[in-house]
Image (cartoon, rainbow, N blue to C red):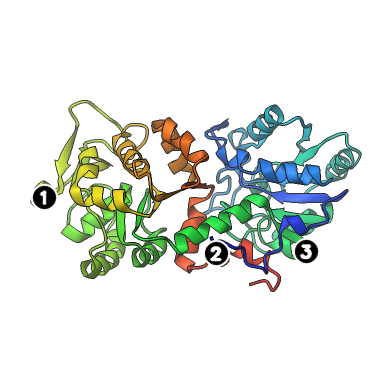
């Protein structure tokens, strides 16, 4: 498609002198929860880049973040085994015929890894001499300088830049400007990996969609997505909300006292209510599932209720799912079934207790045979795979489907209206913008 061409200013790995050089490769392998891989899709998506580096004589040093080991309030970094890269390394070792070395560094119980010691030099020697095929650094968020400001960040950036000849960013899902995604790109020659290029190409299919364009967005927080939601609302023909985002919208629109909805989020949602009064793009899900408990499915203590029946209530318990009947409404079926472009970043109900709404959504979306289906977000893909394994697997090889490795990245690009507006991508552009 003519629109799907990479910006000529983007420096690509295909133009990088890889042979006999150390390649610092930033990936997004953030797929480990409680010490186990939830879904290897993000790992598998980067293997093409790994093969390309190996085939062209490059020697890769990989780095990714796993989880959120840094406490935002205190700044303390806790290096837990359950957020180690070890499961990722084990997976790659089983999938590829490679020997992978994971260097170890001293850990401060309050500050994580403060600096890289001399053991890194020994690890690089193993890589250069072929005794190891690749190095995988510990969880990059264990390093104090990754998300910090000031001397610690500068020191980590310098250490990363000094160990490699080139930098390649293949981490589309890691869209925030941290030391490993942004700063280091200014220190050594930097390029976009094959996966990142693919993601940027497909972003145009969201930013310049074939119409009619329908989107489904859900989430556990409203305040963090209000900007992207407003931008998406302007772009779509139809918008479906789910999760706490939908609950917040309902609470604001109908002045419903729904449990778990803060007054500040209700206030923020009033902007969306006002926007939609003019456009009438948001498709309401008239049937929802109310539960007496915020995180349990107890027989006899949850029920399907219709929104009209909630309006005279003085209190409403937790709304934890969308009833599948909502997806059968004529207006909803028409919007989803006739869309030429469908964007889905949504788990509709609390998992795993309430999967029915999500399953009904994914079935409705994949039943649209002619439309382009774009799924985004780690949780979305994981739940889609669990609930609808057949359609999920079919989509992997379907030219009319695409699975983004980063949901937040897509939403941020939608808010900016530019595939190349993300700061880590800007760092790979010829003029830096």
Q: Please identify the quarter of the rendering in which residue 122 is found.
A: top right
Q: For residue 343, which numbered disc appears in the image?
A: none
Residue at the spot x=10%, y=47% of the render?
Answer: 309
Viewer-nearest of discs 3 and 2? 2
Give the structural element (helix, strand or loop) at label 3: loop
Q: In this view, does 89 lie to the left or right of 325?
A: right
Residue 93 position, x and y percent, is 71, 30
Q: Choose between 18 and 427: the one closer to the eye.
A: 18
Residue at image point 12% right, 48% down? 310
Q: How packed is label 1: few (under 14 Cα within 10 Å), some, or many (20 or more)?
A: few
Picture quarter with the C terminus: bottom right
> Nearer the N terminus, badge 3 or badge 2?
2
Q: Left or right: where does residue 244 sit relative to residue 292?
A: right
Label 1: element kind: helix
x, y (%) of residue 318?
Answer: 24, 42
As drawn, 352 above or below 59: above
The reply to whether discs 3 and 1 touch (Cβ–Cβ < 8 Å) is no
Toward which corner of the image does residue 79 lie, by quadrant?
top right
Query: Label 2: which residue?
Result: 2
Q: Does residue 137 appear in the picture of this structure?
A: no
Q: Is residue 413 visible?
A: yes
Residue at 55% x, 61% y is: 4
Q: How far apart are marks 3 and 1 (CA)?
A: 59 Å
Q: Residue at x 45, y 36 (%)?
A: 392
The residue labelled by disc 1 is 308
Give the crowd class for mark 3: few <14, some 14-19, many >=20 residues within 10 Å: some
Q: In this view, does 46 lie to the left or right of 241?
A: right
Percent coordinates x, y for residue 117 in the rendering = 82, 46
Mark 3, residue position? 187
């Amino acid at each position: 498609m003519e629109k799907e061409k990479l910006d000529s200013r983007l420096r690509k790995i295909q133009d990088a002198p890889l042979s006999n050089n150390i390649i610092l490769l930033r990936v997004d392998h953030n797929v480990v929860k409680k010490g186990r891989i939830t879904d290897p899709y993000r790992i598998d998506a980067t293997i093409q880049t790994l093969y390309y580096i190996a085939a062209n004589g490059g020697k890769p040093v990989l780095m990714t973040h796993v989880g959120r080991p840094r406490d935002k309030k205190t700044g303390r970094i806790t290096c837990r085994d359950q957020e180690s890269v070890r499961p990722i390394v084990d997976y790659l070792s089983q999938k590829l015929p490679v020997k992978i070395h994971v260097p170890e560094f001293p850990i401060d119980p309050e500050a994580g890894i403060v600096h890289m010691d001399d053991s890194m030099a020994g690890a690089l020697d193993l890589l250069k001499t072929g005794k190891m095929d690749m190095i995988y650094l510990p969880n990059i968020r264990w390093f104090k300088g990754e998300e910090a400001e000031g001397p610690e960040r500068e020191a980590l950036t310098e250490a990363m830049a000094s160990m490699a000849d080139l930098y390649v960013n293949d981490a589309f899902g890691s869209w925030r400007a941290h030391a490993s995604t942004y700063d280091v790109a200014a220190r050594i020659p930097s390029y976009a990996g094959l996966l990142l290029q693919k993601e940027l190409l497909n972003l145009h299919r969201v930013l310049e969609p074939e119409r009619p364009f329908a989107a489904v967005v859900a989430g556990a927080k409203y305040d963090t997505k209000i900007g992207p939601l407003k931008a998406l609302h302007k772009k779509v023909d139809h918008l479906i909300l789910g999760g706490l985002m939908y609950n917040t919208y309902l609470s604001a629109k109908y002045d419903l006292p729904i449990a778990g909805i803060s007054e500040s989020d209700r206030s923020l949602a009033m902007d969306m209510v006002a926007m939609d009064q003019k456009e009438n793009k948001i498709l309401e899900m008239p049937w929802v599932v109310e539960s007496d408990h915020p995180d349990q499915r107890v027989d006899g203590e949850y029920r399907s209720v219709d929104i009209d029946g909630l309006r005279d209530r003085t209190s409403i318990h937790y709304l934890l799912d969308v009833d599948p009947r909502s997806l059968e409404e004529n207006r909803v079926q028409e919007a989803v079934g006739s869309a030429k472009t469908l964007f889905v970043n949504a788990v509709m109900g609390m998992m795993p207790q309430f999967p029915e709404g999500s399953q009904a959504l994914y079935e409705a979306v994949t039943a649209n045979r002619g439309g382009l289906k774009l799924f985004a977000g780690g949780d979305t893909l994981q739940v889609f795979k669990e609930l609808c394994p057949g359609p999920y697997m079919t989509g992997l090889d379907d030219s009319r489907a695409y699975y983004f490795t980063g949901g937040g990245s897509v939403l941020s690009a939608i808010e900016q209206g530019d595939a190349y507006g993300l700061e880590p991508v800007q760092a790979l552009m010829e003029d830096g913008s």
